Amino acid sequence: MSGDTNHVEAIKQKRNLLLAVLMLPVVGMGISMLLIYWRFPHMIGTALPIIFLLMLQYVLLVRWIKKKIDVL
C-alpha cells in the first residue's frame, strides 16, 4: 500500500505540470482553427463548431481530472 501513497503524492506535487500537459491538445485545436481560417476560410463554418465542441468536451474532462486530483 505504501507504493500507492507514493504515486498519489507524486501526482499531487506535479499537479500543475500534469494539467499543463493534458491541455496541450486544446492548444493544438486552437492552432488548427487559425490554420483552417488562414488556408480555407470557406470551411470555417463547418470546422469551427466541431473543433469548439471537441475543445469544450476536453476542457470539461481536464476539469474533472483536476477535481479528482484535489480529492486524492
Image (tube, helix red, strand yellow):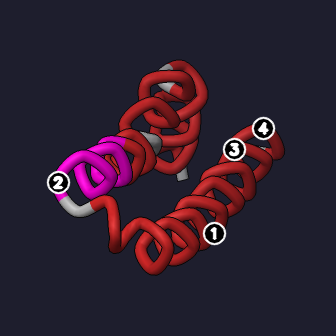
At 17% from the left and 54% from the top, the residue drawn is: 39
- Residue 39 is labelled as 2
- Residue 66 is labelled as 3
In depth, the one of 62 and 7 nearer the eye is 62
Of badges 2 and 4, the one in the foreground is 2
Label 4 belongs to which residue? 70
**Left or right: 21, with 55 as reference point:** left
At 63% from the left and 69% from the top, the residue drawn is: 57
Q: Return the disc, 2 or 4, that comes first in the chain's sequence.
A: 2
In depth, the one of 18 and 31 nearer the eye is 31
Determine contact: label 4, label 3, CB under 8 Å: yes
The amino acid type of the residue labelled 4 equals: Asp
What range of the chain is rendered magenta?
31-39
- Mark 4 Cα-neighbour bin, 10 Å: few <14, some 14–19, many ≥20: few
Q: Return the disc, 2 or 1, that comes first in the chain's sequence.
A: 2
Label 1 belongs to which residue? 57
